[in-house]
Every structure is written in structure tokens, then in C-alpha cells.
Image: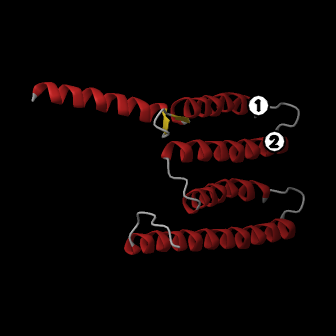
Amino acid sequence: MIENSGFSDENLRKIAAQKVSYRFSVKMHVIIYITINLLLILINVLYTPLFYWFIFPLFSWLIGVSMHVTGYILYARGVYPMAKRGVILHIVSFISVILFLYIINIFTLEGLYWANFPAIFWGIAVIIHLVLYLQFFSKKVEKTGKQLSKKERAIEKELEKMRKKQRRNI
């Protein structure tokens, strides 16, 4: 038995087309990333073998690729609430960038770990973002059996106030 998802065939076709386009785009970017970075490694080894500079474009570009792949996965998996997408993208970008900063730190000023400062302060921002998301968007079961977030409950409460006011004015 086919369950009715509430989407028309036309809407499902648009969603499927978007997923296929995103998937193709991600594959294309990953193939280009691998190809270009293999060329950069080859150039580095042939012309400047004493300093491995290829690591900088390799990891910096990896940040963009990781964000692209994460965006596709979130869309393909149907992670719709933008707040949840925002938290996940924030965590992935934090991990990617901080990893890159530590790599730069090791190659430039080994022993002086300046990358700890952005890791700590941005890490605090990520934790605050996560706490706020959990506080305002985590769902609780209502008496009616519905799962509503704090924001949704506030909207329902405000809606009820507006309905009462409208009834009084009639």
C-alpha cells in the first residue's frame, strides 16, 4: 500500500530532480577536487620537494567540498528545519576550519599553538548555537499527543490569544 505523503507527483518530480542535480554537482566537485589536488601534489614533488606546500590548497579546498557534501546530505536526507541544518553546517565548518588551522599552525609555528584561540572561542560559539537550538527547537509531547518545539508552542499560544481577541471583537 502506498502511503500518501501529501506531495503531488509534480512536486515529487521537482524534489527528485533537485536531488539528482545536487548529487551530480557534488560528484563533479569531488572529482575536480581530487584531480586538481593530484596535479598539485605532482607539481610539488617535481619542482619543490623540500616543502610540501600542496597541503594548504588540499585542506583549504576540502573545507568547501565538505560544506558542499554536507549541504547535499542534509537536503537528500530531508533535514528540513533550517535551524537544524544551521547547527549541523556550523559544526561541520568548525571542525573543517579548525583542522586546517592546526595544520597551518604545525607547518608554520610549531610549539606556539595559536590555533587554540580560534578553536576555543569558535568552539564556545558552536556550543552556544547547539544549546540555543536544543532549547528552542527540541520537541516536547503536548497533552494532545503532538510534538511541538518551544517556538511552535509559543506560536500556538500567540495564535490562541489572537483568536480570543478576534472572537471578542465580533
Q: Which residue is mark 2?
A: 108
Q: Quarter-wise, where is residue 121 in the image? A: top right
Residue 120 location (% of width, % of height): 72, 28
User: Dot 1 surroundings within 10 Å: few (below 14), some, or many (20 or more)?
Assistant: some
Q: Which residue is mark 1?
A: 116
Tell me which residue sits at (38%, 74%) in the image: 10
Using the image as rendered, state which of residue 126 and residue 4 is in the foreground.
4
Is the residue under label 2 in contact with that under label 1 (CB below 8 Å)? Answer: no
Question: Circle 1 sits in a helix, a strand or a loop, which is it?
Answer: helix
Choose mark 1 or mark 2, whichever is in front: 1
- Marking on residue 143: none
Using the image as rendered, state which of residue 7 and residue 68 is in the foreground.
7
Side (left or right) of 116 relative to 24:
right
Amino acid type indicated by mark 2: Thr
In this view, 39 is above or below 5: below
Using the image as rendered, state which of residue 159 and residue 92 is in the foreground.
159
Tell me which residue sits at (69%, 67%) in the image: 33
* N-terminal-most mark, 1 or 2: 2
Side (left or right) of 96 relative to 46:
left
Q: Quarter-wise, where is residue 7 in the image? A: bottom left
Residue 24 location (% of width, % of height): 58, 74
